[in-house]
């Protein structure tokens, strides 16, 4: 990923500095202006940033090759520490933009709908938890330090791998399985989408260099659904005959697809590499360089591959013996030169030769080198003495004993150390696998525990939940009840987003408050009878459940009635499929009844004080009452629950009642007007952005009244 990003930046003429995250000076194919070989947690990182002062710093995060995730527990700690050090150093510059690359790994389980940015993360495993925690750290620096941060989540990026380098994407894994065994195991219950590296880099460049964006987090996804069986058949078709696809479609479905709608809306998106073309590039490259991906013990996908592997195993076995024999001739020559030399006559080159191969290769090679040394010694003695004299010489046997004792002892120690290291590695691998199994079991137990706790609360602790709802709402001011209600609704239903619509008439309902961008998807005003499936359920006083997963419809909805008239509509998003049950529907209905009682209480209270809150039985509110109401709206806007705009309208003749009557024709029932004094009145536009408030200002001007938008700080 990093090299592809560098190549794209170079293509645009940007000056690229690279912090490798490693001390080793490894070669790099792409050209960079300067390369710094420091680890990410090094104190020199701060000096690097101060020296370079980059406009954009990109941390490849989930795709950073300097992290070795085979020991995920230890590496997750190093990953978090590295990111904290980088962010701390970069935030001291006071300028620039930081881009963090994340992945779909922060989600687990399954979802029938594409996952938006607002969907709650559910990482599983140390690697995914570290990546998710990295997102939280970046978001925290953005909120607390004011750092310009952009988080990009990629959805199953795949690419043509380097020779012999393993990757994690499903396309690589299936190709590797086909090369090793000649078959691919796949399931049509495993559903995902993939993005070719070239497209991912292009979209990441666009998101990283865009001057201003309304969001901090974006999903980068092709959103083109494919399942494991379809991908396996595509790879098999490209590889040709000899690759069998094994259908393992059993068990629960697993569907994780990121929703890149926000990216498409804000930046635009075009995918240039379709699945067939991208997968074909991966398959053809891995077939051409199959020897770099297949280990010697793998069977391979063809007879030729199996023959090559057996030949490589044979050569790997013979190489130490060939080295031994070649080294023997070298030491034989050195020993023949040393004989009779005043400097080297006491140096035994044969003993050094045996010692060297015992240390490097172990006991077997020590025996071979010892035998060769004895043969070499005998050959060198032949010109000086007869073979019989050599055999009868006591010193010859002492020398041979010395040679083999040293060689065998050193070789034995070398073999034992190698055996102990291998046993330790095997034991660590076994314990890590056991740990992963225990973590999987623990995750399963936690999910079961949470489900049982939820059932217990719903069945036996329902009084506690009812008290929690009613007591929280009772403590709120009448103007704040619905804002508090939507937050409580989202928390108690444990969903990704909630919205409350107030029914204006028998045709339209208007958005009052919402907890997430996804909950605002339907717009500020909806024609709810046109939503036939939902409306049919709500008018029968039943909870609507979106069982068909219809797009642009809430997953669950419920209505609150006031004397047989629909008054409020609750809508929920981001609920897991397994929780869309009758029990959850009953829960939503109970919460709706609790909110209804609080809303009725607030309405009755405000109606009792109507004469004190409104001027001369008009829509114009008294200054104090309007101040309380506007304060409630602005507080809710700060919490992200609603959107509002405040207009100041000039009233030259100070006839506020007549001005309010005239302006009422240009406002909605959900808008509010209040006396301000000094020849002006205020109009609070609910669920209206400053851009949309311009149209209201134009309508007021057409009615003969000038107005202006009041900034938040002026209030």
Image (cartoon, helix red, strand yellow):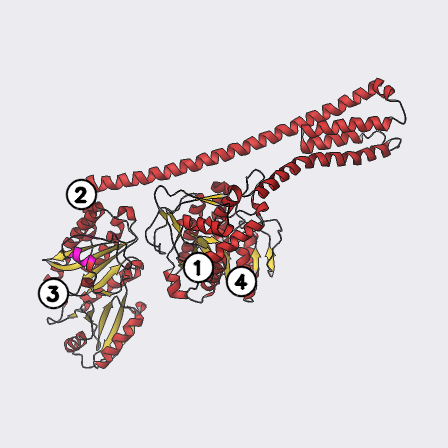
Q: Nearer the viewer, mark 4 or mark 2?
A: 4
Do residues under tags 1 and 4 come within 8 Å of each other at their CB atoms?
no
Q: Secondary structure at mark 2?
A: helix
Name the one closer to the observer, 49 or 58.
Answer: 58
Residue under numbered circle 4? 8
Position above or below: 460 against 96 = above
Mark 2: few/some/many CA within 10 Å (<14, 14-19, 20+): few
Residue 196 in view of the camera: no
Q: Secondary structure at mark 1?
A: strand
* Residue drawn 16% across the image and 57% down it: 536
Residue under numbered circle 3? 610
**Mark number displayed over residue 463:** 2
Residue 146 coordinates in the image, percent (x, y): 42, 60
Residue under numbered circle 1? 149
Name the one closer to the observer, 528 or 322.
Answer: 322
Do residues under tags 2 and 1 come within 8 Å of each other at their CB atoms?
no
Residue 4 coordinates in the image, percent (x, y): 53, 58
Q: Which residues are magenta?
A: 533-550
């Amino acid at each position: 990923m990093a090299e592809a990003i560098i190549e794209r930046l170079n293509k645009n003429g940007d000056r690229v500095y690279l912090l490798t995250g490693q001390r080793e000076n490894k070669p790099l194919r792409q050209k960079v202006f300067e390369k710094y070989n420091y680890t990410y947690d090094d104190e020199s990182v701060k000096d690097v940033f101060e020296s370079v002062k980059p406009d954009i710093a990109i941390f490849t995060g989930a795709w950073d090759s300097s992290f070795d995730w085979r020991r995920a527990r230890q590496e997750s700690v190093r990953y978090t520490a590295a990111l904290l050090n980088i962010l701390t150093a970069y935030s001291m510059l006071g300028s620039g933009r930081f881009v963090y690359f994340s992945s779909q790994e922060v989600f687990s389980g399954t979802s029938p709908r594409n996952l938006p940015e607002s969907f709650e993360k559910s990482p599983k495993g140390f690697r995914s938890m570290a990546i998710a925690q990295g997102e939280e750290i970046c978001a925290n620096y953005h909120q607390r330090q004011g750092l310009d941060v952009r988080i990009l989540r990629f959805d199953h990026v795949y690419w043509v791998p380097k020779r012999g380098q393993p990757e994690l994407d499903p396309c690589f894994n299936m190709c590797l399985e086909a090369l090793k065994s000649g078959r691919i195991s796949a399931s049509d219950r495993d559903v995902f989408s993939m993005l070719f590296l070239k497209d991912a880099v292009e979209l990441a460049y666009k998101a990283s260099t865009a001057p201003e964006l309304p969001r901090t987090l974006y999903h980068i996804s092709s959103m083109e659904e494919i399942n494991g069986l379809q991908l396996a058949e595509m790879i098999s078709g490209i590889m040709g005959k000899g690759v069998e696809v094994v259908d393992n479609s059993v068990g629960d479905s697993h569907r994780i697809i990121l929703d890149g709608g926000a990216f498409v809306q804000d930046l635009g998106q075009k995918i240039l590499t379709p699945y067939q073309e991208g997968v074909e590039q991966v398959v053809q490259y891995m077939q051409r360089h199959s020897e770099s991906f297949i280990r010697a013990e793998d069977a391979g996908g063809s007879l030729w591959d199996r023959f090559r592997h057996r030949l490589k195993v044979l050569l790997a076995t013979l190489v130490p013996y060939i080295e031994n024999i070649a080294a023997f001739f070298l030491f034989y020559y050195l020993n023949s030169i040393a004989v009779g030399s005043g400097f080297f006559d006491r140096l035994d080159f044969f003993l050094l030769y045996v010692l060297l191969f015992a240390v490097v290769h172990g006991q077997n090679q020590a025996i071979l080198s010892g035998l060769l040394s004895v043969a070499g010694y005998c050959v060198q003695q032949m010109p000086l003495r007869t073979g019989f004299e050599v055999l009868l010489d006591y010193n010859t046997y002492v020398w041979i004993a010395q040679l083999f004792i040293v060689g065998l002892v050193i070789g034995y120690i070398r073999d034992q150390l190698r055996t102990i290291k291998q046993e330790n590695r095997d034991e660590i691998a076994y314990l890590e696998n056991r740990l992963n199994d225990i973590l999987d079991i623990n995750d399963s137990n936690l999910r079961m525990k949470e489900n049982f706790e939820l059932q217990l609360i719903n069945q036996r602790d329902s009084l506690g939940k009812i008290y929690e709802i009613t007591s929280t709402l009772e403590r709120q001011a009448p103007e704040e009840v619905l804002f508090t209600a939507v937050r409580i609704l989202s928390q108690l239903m444990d969903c990704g987003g909630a919205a409350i619509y107030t029914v204006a008439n028998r045709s339209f309902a208007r958005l009052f408050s919402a907890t997430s961008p996804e909950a605002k998807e339907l717009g500020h005003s909806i024609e709810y009878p046109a939503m036939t499936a939902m409306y049919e359920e709500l008018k029968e006083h039943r909870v609507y459940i979106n069982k068909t997963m219809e797009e642009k419809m809430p997953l669950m909805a419920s209505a609150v009635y006031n004397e047989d008239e629909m008054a409020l509509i609750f809508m929920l998003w981001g609920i897991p499929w397994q929780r869309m049950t009758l029990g959850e529907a009953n829960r939503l209905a109970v919460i709706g009844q609790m909110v209804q009682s609080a809303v009725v209480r607030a309405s009755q209270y405000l109606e009792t004080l109507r004469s004190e809150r409104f001027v001369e039985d008009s829509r114009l509110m008294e200054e104090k009452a309007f101040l309380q109401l506007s304060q409630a709206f602005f507080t809710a806007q700060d919490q992200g629950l609603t959107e509002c705009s405040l207009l100041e309208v000039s009233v030259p003749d100070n006839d506020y009642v007549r001005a309010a009557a005239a302006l009422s024709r240009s406002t909605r029932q959900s808008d509010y007007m209040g006396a301000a004094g000094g020849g002006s009145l205020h109009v609070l536009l609910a669920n209206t952005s400053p851009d949309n408030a311009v149209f209201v200002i134009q309508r007021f001007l057409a009615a003969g009244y000038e107005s202006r938008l009041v900034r938040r700080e002026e209030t």
